[in-house]
Every structure is written in C-alpha cells, then in structure tokens.
Image (tube, grey):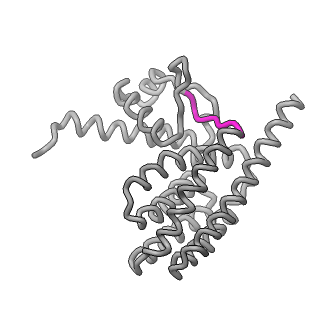
Amino acid sequence: MTAPSGQLTLTTLRRQVADRIRGEILAGNLRAGEKIVERKFAAQFGTSLTAVREAVIQLEAEGYIRKKPNAATYVTELTLKDFEDLLLVRRLLEGQAVAIAAERASEEDKEKLQNLFLRSAEAARDRDVQAYIRRDLDWHEAVWAITRNDWLVEALRRVVCPHFSFACILIASQKTFDLVEDSNSHMPLLQAIRRNQPEEARRAFETGLELWRQQAVDYYTEAESTAKAN
C-alpha cells in the first residue's frame, strides 16, 4: 500500500531539518547548553513548526539534544558525572557487543567493517568533522549489528549516541583534536574482529575507551580552569 503523500513529505522534512540542526551542532555553531528555539528554526529553514518538532524528537532520541525539567530543549551538555555514568554503561554493553561480534563476524561482515573504517579514516584525514563523526558512528553500529541482537543494538544506540554528541562538542571546541589519531585507535579492535578473537576485541575496546575517557577528562579540566580564570 502506498503511504499518503503528506506523511512522506513530513518524514522527508523531519529528516532534512534534523540533518541541518545536527550539522550545526557538529560544526560547533550550536554550543553545549544552547537553547533550541523551534519557531526560530522553522523560520530559518522555511518549514513547518511540526517538521521542526518532529526533528527535535529525533535528535533527542539520538542524544544530540535534551529536554530539561522546565520543558525547554537544549543542545546536550554533559557534566563529568554524566559522562562517567554513561561511560560505565557503555563499557558493560559495548564491551560485550564487540566480543560477540568478534566471535560471530563473517567474511562479509569483516569486509563491511574494513570499508567503513577506511571511509571514516578518509574523513579524518580531510578533517571533515561532520563526516568523521557520522562515519565513526556508522562503524560502531555495524559492529553492534554483527551480534544479531536487536535489543542490544537498541540499548547501545540510546547509551552511545549521547557520547557521540559530546564528541561533536569536544572536537568543535578543540581545534587541535587529532581526528587521524582517533581514527587509528579503532584499528586494534578491527583487527581483533577480523581474527575472530573475542577477548582480544574486548581488550582493544577497553584500551580505546580509556583513551577517549582521558581526552574527556582533560576537556573538562581545561573548561573548568578557563571558567575560573574568567
């Protein structure tokens, strides 16, 4: 059955608006904690308020924005405690996922991961932050998909997307962030999966996650020092 054209139009508009707002966040034009004004975006993009609201719901699910108790919507701003709490859950869930993926990965799966890695590495070399973050998330999601466990994949999306939105904020605020180094940190995990070595994959993931944690702690420490100096 063909879907009503109005529904298709709204779906398309929602996706386009979500892409543009996400792009503004990735580019650093919308900063952590900045309020999302739906009417402003509707006027700016020349679209309906309904499409913007649908886009906001999508971006909230992805972790790029959050609603606060007063119902206002803001670009995601994680405290260090928020980050550490999410990291704990991510370590448990994704650590298990990469081990399962390494055990179950087929040759076709391995080839797909290799191609996605090369695409993200290309974006890193070009210092295309938006493309890199998107392709890096695609790579992680491809690893999760190898588990063939939809519940685990959905749980990971809910936990990991806020971390990726934080990555966007961190990279946008630190022009010296080395995308190539970050991309290369995925190589040991990719190699472990290609060798079908679950425990090696888990260790590689833990090592990469700890490096990312240290970068985040450094970011928070620097931000706190800057705030005190001002």
Please tell me which residue lies in front, 114 or 174. Answer: 114
Q: Is residue 55 left or right of residue 168?
A: left
The image quarter containing residue 202 is bottom right
Classify residue 123 by image quadrant: bottom right
Residue appearing at x 43%, y 75% in the figure: 105
Q: Quadrant of the C terminus?
A: top right
- Residue 180: quarter of image: bottom right
Where's residue 58, x and y in %? 42, 38
67 vs 120, nearest the viewer: 67
Q: Is residue 17 above or below residue 131?
A: above
Q: Residue furthest left?
A: 1
Seen from the viewer's position, the closer of residues 56 and 24 is: 56
Residue 148 horizontal/vertical position (percent):
37, 64
x, y percent for residue 33 = 63, 30
| Number of marks in picture | 0
Question: 147 or 8: nearer the eye?
Answer: 147
Question: Magenta segment, which residues?
Answer: 74-80
Q: Residue shown at 56%/54% (left/top)?
A: 133
Above or below, comparing residue 228 to residue 134 in the picture: above
Q: Does the segment drawn in magenta span residue 78?
A: yes
Give the answer, above or below, for where 178 lies relative to 51.
Answer: below
Residue under the image location 47 percent in, 72 percent down: 115
Whether residue 221 appears in magenta in the rendering, the answer is no
Left or right side of 36 for 180: right
Residue 119 position (above or below residue 106): above
Q: Residue furthest right?
A: 229
User: Residue at the location (76% across, 54% down)?
Assistant: 214
